[in-house]
Image (cartoon, rainbow, N blue to C red):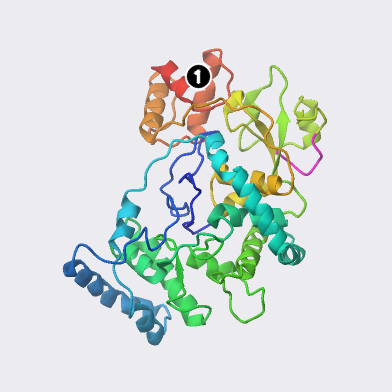
């Protein structure tokens, strides 16, 4: 979420930024979660590299202390937090070796919105329904969205991570790829400790520093976590998820959630539809889309919930959706089309909504980063300039794809598929 690395991953071990319509691409941005839930059995708290590594780490801590104190951290808070902190080599290993996943959005959704996750979500709703209603009434954020974020992040609190946050963030600040980012997160974590919201022993979470039931990074916690129980602490770590769920609602509200508005609605497209209208910029009212033949799966115009964009996760060959403002609000929690679809559809299914009606393309996988670069190179070589070869399917690459597809007599959906790459070869 915003400046966050989420912690608990889906059982499939994927979460990434969807840069093309349907592929799920591993992101290097610090907002994206690590690959899997982390417990003490997964992250070793013993340094196999020996005392020299720990000595170097302690030297870094001594150098960092004046910076932390100059940022307003009380000396007593710093010394207490680092009394038991130590270097975690497994954290660095994980940060450096996050695998690239090439699952498509529909493969991702198979896990994100599994029968078990829907069933467990309904059980969580039965147990915490009154709390969720109070949170919804206070923040104007639909309970289904908060519940779905909880399910996506930690399977309704079942794996919150128990890696010591100070040790993890200090390790990454000392020896990671994004030292400045993690040092900022570490200082925020120390401010949280100074505020009395929790203790060093209780401040646990993922190897990447995300905390609690809904996986707040420290800077996001500082900005938007709330004390909904009224006990004087913003306790997102407690077995009682109330503060964490309310904090998630506060986050979504802060970023513009519109109560009662769906994230999106599945639609049908007419024959001969202009796929050039399916982009991130084109917004129309559902009534305007209906005049173009874009209607709900029941054949009726979609209700006017506000301006909507047409989203084609699999290009011309799969399901189509009109997405509303709340889809983009969910993306502020995690900047991924796949994640936003997962949250939205999971919430719908928990509340009794229907499965996605359209058929997906099948077993096709997404492109690897090398294949995306090859796609860009081949498009540019054919005169369809992608304005660079970086492995990211951004607006310029999508435009080049559409132009190539038009020239080749293909539906110009801008979808970067393995089939299209093979055609370019």
Looking at the image, which residue is at 59% across and 69% down? 225
Quadrant including the C terminus: top left
What is the x, y in percent for residue 329? 64, 51
Q: Quadrant of residue 252?
A: bottom right
Q: Is residue 258 visible?
A: yes
Q: Is residue 400 magenta?
A: no
Circle 1 residues within 10 Å: few <14, some 14–19, many ≥20:
many
Looking at the image, which residue is at 22% across and 62% down? 48
In front of the other: 268 or 379: 268
Looking at the image, which residue is at 37% across and 77% down? 68
Quadrant including the N terminus: bottom right
What is the x, y in percent for residue 74? 41, 85
Image vertical order of residue 259 relative to residue 114, above or below:
below
Image vertical order of residue 25 relative to residue 362, above or below:
below
- Look at the magenta stretch and give its main secondary structure: loop
Residue that numbered label 1 is attached to: 404
Q: Seen from this angle, which residue lies furthest top?
A: 409
What is the x, y in percent for residue 392? 44, 37
Instruction: Give the residues drawn in magenta, as a range.
Output: 302-309
Image vertical order of residue 283 relative to residue 261, above or below:
above
In front of the other: 147 or 59: 147
Q: How many marks?
A: 1
Q: Secondary structure at mark 1?
A: helix
């Amino acid at each position: 979420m915003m400046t966050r690395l989420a912690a608990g991953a889906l059982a499939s071990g994927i979460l990434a930024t969807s840069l093309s319509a349907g592929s799920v691409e591993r992101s290097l941005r610090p907002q994206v979660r690590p690959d899997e839930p982390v417990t003490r059995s997964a992250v070793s708290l013993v340094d196999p590299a020996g005392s020299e590594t720990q000595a170097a780490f302690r030297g870094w801590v001594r150098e960092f202390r004046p910076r932390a104190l100059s940022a307003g951290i009380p000396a007593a808070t710093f010394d207490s937090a680092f009394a038991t902190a130590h270097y975690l080599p497994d954290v660095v290993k994980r940060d450096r070796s996050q695998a690239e996943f090439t699952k498509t959005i529909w493969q991702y959704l198979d896990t994100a919105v599994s029968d078990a996750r829907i069933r467990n979500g309904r059980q969580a709703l039965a147990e915490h329904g009154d709390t969720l209603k109070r949170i919804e009434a206070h923040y104007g954020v639909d309970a289904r969205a908060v519940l779905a974020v909880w399910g996506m992040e930690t399977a309704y609190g079942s794996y919150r991570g128990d890696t010591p946050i100070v040790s993890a963030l200090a390790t990454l600040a000392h020896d990671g790829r994004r030292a400045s980012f993690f040092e900022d997160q570490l200082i925020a974590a120390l401010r949280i400790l100074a505020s009395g919201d929790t203790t060093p022993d209780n401040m646990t979470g993922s190897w990447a520093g995300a905390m609690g039931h809904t996986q707040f990074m420290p800077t996001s916690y500082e900005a938007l976590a709330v004390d909904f129980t009224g006990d004087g602490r913003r306790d997102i770590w407690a077995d009682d998820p109330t503060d964490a769920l309310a904090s998630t609602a506060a986050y979504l509200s802060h970023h513009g959630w519109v109560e009662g508005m769906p994230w999106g609605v599945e639609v049908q497209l007419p024959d001969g539809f202009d796929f050039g209208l399916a982009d991130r910029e084109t917004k129309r009212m559902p009534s305007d889309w209906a005049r173009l033949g874009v209607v709900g799966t029941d054949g009726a115009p979609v209700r006017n919930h506000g301006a909507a964009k047409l989203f084609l996760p699999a290009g011309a060959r799969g399901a189509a959706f009109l997405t509303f403002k709340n889809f983009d609000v969910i993306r502020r929690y995690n900047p991924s089309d796949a994640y936003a679809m997962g949250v939205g559809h999971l919430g719908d299914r928990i509340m009794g909504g229907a499965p996605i009606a359209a058929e997906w393309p099948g077993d096709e996988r997404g492109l690897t980063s090398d294949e995306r670069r090859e796609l860009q190179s081949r498009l540019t070589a054919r005169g369809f300039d992608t304005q660079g070869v970086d492995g990211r399917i951004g607006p310029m690459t999508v435009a080049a794809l559409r132009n190539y597809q038009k020239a080749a007599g293909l539906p110009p959906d801008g979808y970067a598929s393995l089939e299209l790459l093979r055609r370019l070869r």
